[in-house]
Image (cartoon, rainbow, N blue to C red):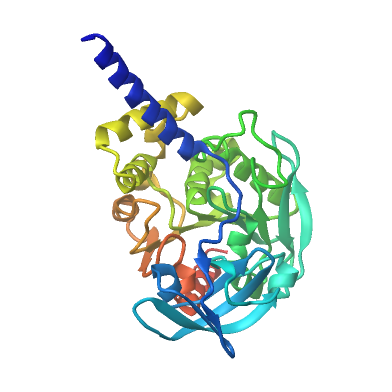
């Protein structure tokens, strides 16, 4: 009996660590609609009051067969929020629908969503052809912007910057990568938190070069930000030719996976020692070294101009490492813009301010 209890305790701890590490590496692309439409008026929709339904800014509203664009809050009370509906893009908005607030705002493809011409292309990778959207720009012989979405997201996450990039005449390549819908899967079918996915970013850079790109700006959201920075450090061509990356744009980037996993463990009320076990299990399970994703350790050697957005209410990614990264980088190398909003919502809370900052940065580094 006295031997059995410690064994059971160790097994329980190991099981929790295995489960939590499994959540971190899970590939999931399903849609969820956790909200219910309470009322639909003339040009308005009433939703339950939640942080995401009441937040000022520009948002989409999605349901199984439809999408609408939301405008400002125009009414409500302690339990509900009334918002303007700018347009119903697809389907019929009706009382009782199961919906979700979408911070990507737009759906479909660049032509349907934004009226911007594009090409469906494929770039070669070690796992096979990867799909991407190419917005051609004025000339392929110029600086390209490569958009890298976050964990379990897709190319639609990059819609919000397309008008700005297109307006400057720059080509933009918005990429899918391993385990995305329509893309080749990794051998284990697991998310590696950027530790292998960065190779697809490097392949996209090679594709841009083959098409005439004279340089690239890498724009990464969330885990896409970690992938971008890892590509700079690990890709042989970019190590030899660092100036080919004219700049980086990091939107709510994962700057330290260890800190972010601690944050996620705290949100699940896990004691820190269990989170520690889970992180060790994760490292062994997918062969990752979490310390290699501690970006502030590398900040002092940064030579790539960087524009970084963080959100004050980020419930997904630990923000302190982003502040540490900006402070540790050489003076003037990082332009850090903190904003209101939740994870990757900097554009949504103030599209005009985001686009001004992005346009100024791209104009400077192109």
Q: Name the spot of residue 242 as percent of width and height, x first.
A: 53, 46
Seen in the picture, residue 202 relative to 68 is either above or below; the reply is above
Q: Nearer the viewer, residue 364 or 217?
A: 217
Seen in the picture, residue 185 relative to 154 is either above or below; the reply is above
Seen in the picture, residue 130 relative to 282 is either above or below; the reply is below
Q: Nearer the viewer, residue 85 or 96?
A: 96
Q: Name the spot of residue 355 as percent of width and height, x first.
A: 52, 74
Place residue 85 in its image quadrant. Answer: bottom right
Place residue 145 in its image quadrant. Answer: bottom right
Most distant residue in the left direction: 2
Residue at horizontal 52%, vertical 40%? 194
Q: How many marks?
A: 0
Q: Name the spot of residue 204 as percent of width and height, x first.
A: 66, 47
Q: Is residue 18 among what the camera can see?
A: yes
Quadrant of the image containing the C terminus: bottom right
Is 226 on the left-hand or right-hand side of 121?
A: left
Residue at horizontal 46%, vertical 39%? 24
Residue at horizontal 49%, vertical 51%? 225
Is 2 on the left-hand or right-hand side of 10?
A: left
Quadrant of the image containing the N terminus: top left
Most distant residue in the bottom direction: 42
Q: Is residue 102 among what the camera can see?
A: no
Q: Nearer the viewer, residue 263 or 1?
A: 1
Residue at horizontal 67%, vertical 57%? 173
Is 69 on the left-hand or right-hand side of 316?
A: right
Q: Name the spot of residue 250 as percent of width and height, x first.
A: 47, 57
């Amino acid at each position: 009996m006295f031997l059995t209890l410690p064994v059971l305790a160790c097994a329980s701890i190991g099981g929790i660590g295995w489960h939590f590490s499994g959540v971190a590496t899970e590939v999931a692309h399903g849609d969820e609609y956790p909200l219910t439409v309470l009322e639909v008026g003339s040009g308005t929709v009433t939703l339950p009051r939640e942080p995401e339904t009441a937040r000022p800014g520009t948002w989409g509203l999605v349901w199984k067969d439809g999408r609408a664009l939301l405008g400002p809050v125009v009414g409500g009370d302690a339990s509900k929020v009334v918002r303007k509906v700018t347009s119903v893009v697809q389907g019929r908005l009706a009382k009782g629908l199961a919906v979700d607030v979408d911070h990507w705002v737009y759906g479909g493809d660049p032509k349907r969503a934004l009226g911007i011409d594009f090409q469906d292309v494929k770039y070669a990778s070690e796992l096979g052809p990867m799909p991407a959207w190419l917005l051609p720009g004025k000339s392929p012989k110029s600086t390209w912007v490569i958009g890298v979405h976050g964990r379990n997201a897709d190319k639609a996450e990059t819609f919000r910057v397309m008008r700005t990039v297109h307006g400057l005449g720059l080509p933009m390549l918005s990429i899918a990568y391993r385990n995305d819908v329509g893309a080749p899967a990794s051998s284990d079918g697991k998310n590696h938190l950027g530790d292998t996915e960065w190779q697809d970013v490097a392949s996209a850079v090679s594709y841009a070069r083959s098409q005439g790109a004279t340089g690239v700006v890498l724009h990464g959201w969330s885990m896409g930000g970690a992938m971008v920075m890892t590509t700079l450090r690990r890709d042989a061509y970019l190590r030899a030719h660092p100036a080919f990356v004219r700049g980086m744009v990091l939107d709510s980037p994962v700057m330290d996976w260890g800190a972010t996993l601690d944050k996620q463990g705290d949100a699940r009320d896990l004691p820190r020692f269990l989170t520690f076990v889970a992180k060790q299990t994760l490292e062994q399970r997918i062969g990752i070294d979490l310390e290699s994703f501690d970006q502030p350790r590398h900040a002092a050697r940064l030579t790539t101009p960087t524009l970084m957005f963080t959100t004050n209410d980020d419930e997904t990614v630990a923000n302190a490492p982003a502040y540490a990264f900006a402070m540790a980088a050489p003076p003037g190398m990082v332009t850090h813009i903190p904003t209101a909003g939740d994870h990757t919502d900097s554009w949504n809370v103030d599209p005009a301010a985001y686009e001004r900052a992005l346009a100024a940065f791209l104009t400077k580094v192109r």
